[in-house]
Amino acid sequence: MMQNRVRWMLWFTVLGSLALTTLGVCVGSVGFENLLQPLLSGSSDPESAALARQIVWEIRLPRTMGAWAAGALLGLAGAVAQGLFRNPLADPYLLGSASGASLGVALALAAMGGAAGMLGGGAPQSSLAIGVFSNSLLVRLGLTGAAFLGSVAAIVLTLVLSRGVGHTLRLLLAGVIVGAVLGAVTHLVLMASPDSLQAMWAFMLGSTAFVGWVSLALMVAAWLVSLVAAWLLARVLDALSLGDATAQSLGLPVVPMRAALVGVLALATGTAVAQTGLIAFVGLAAPHLVRSAIKTTHGQLIVLASLVGGVLLMAADTLARWLVAPQELPVGVLTAVLGGGYLLWLMHRGSAKVGGVL
């Protein structure tokens, strides 16, 4: 019975991803009906056909697939974080990793000369005048590496301040403190480097608008590495759910395994944040949705939460482009509103159950 549910959820996420990919290609500031005719009659109007192909293949398709990849990374990171810290409220952002990744990106932008060159500003087009809108492989690797290091540093600092993961309240408070401090440092860096402000503003709101094929390739590569690593470490998460003492009694090297899981969490979070900015609640909601449908081990949970996260963010990105078309909402704003409503509903349902028992 349980395996049937797992298979049904796998099919649902795969078919949902394919359907949303098709829908995402059709939604944008230019209606798909205005693109279809030039695509079908390319020989009669080659310029319009070339523009239509560019919109579909260079903008909408990588952006839509990039939304799935970022959501898959956040869903995976959320499942790992909740298992690692034995806390169903843990997500990649709650423990300061997102603030650390943002600080890393801000420092990288400041070091590389800001984003004026990429945004079409009046700054000189030096080799360092680049930013989050660049599709250069070196730029994307640099931003991803900076976000990864910042994410690792933030998580380690949170663990040091909380003295491990045994005390849930202390851990959450440490994550809030680290996030606030690193956020303040990020704003100081941006004040010192005003050329980076415009790019970082879009980045902090969360957007897939600057995702291209290079960004997509990096996210898919990071997702595959993180997924394999998390799958191999899933047995450790199952043991940790019973407590550190039980995990050690089973002969598992808890300390190095936990460090490896922190690395997976940082890689997934840092890569997603570096490419799409701060997109909230996907990493928290995806594991909860899977657990509400299926009670399973962490191995299957990680895979399913990753797939569900991809579907959630792809749907949110498509909705953000459609709601106020031809304008669009930052997808991070939309996920924050929807995710906040989802959390309030969970709290209300939990209170209602407690009241019914009493």
Image: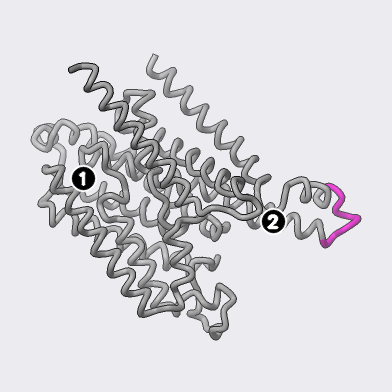
Q: Position of residue 347 (x, y in %)?
A: 29, 32
Residue lying at the far bottom of the rendered structure: 124
Quarter residue 296 falls in:
top left
Marker disc for residue 128: none
- Asked if labels 1 and 2 touch by Cβ distance under 8 angstroms, the answer is no
Total residue callouts: 2
SS label for mark 2:
helix
Q: Where in the figure is residue 100, as x and y percent of width and height?
A: 30, 61
Whole-number angstrom distance, CA of label 2 to CA of label 1: 45 Å
Q: Left or right: where does residue 161 sit relative to residue 134?
A: left
Q: Which residue is mark 1?
A: 257
| Magenta stretch encompasses residue 43 | yes
Classify the position of the C terminus by image quarter: top left
Residue 111 horizontal/vertical position (percent):
39, 78
- Report whether residue 2 is seen: yes
The label nearer to you, 2 versus 1, is: 2
- Image disc number at residue 55: 2
Lower sequence index among marks 2 and 1? 2
Q: Is residue 318 magenta?
A: no
* Up-down relation of residue 182 to residue 30 (above or below): below
| Region in magenta | 40-47
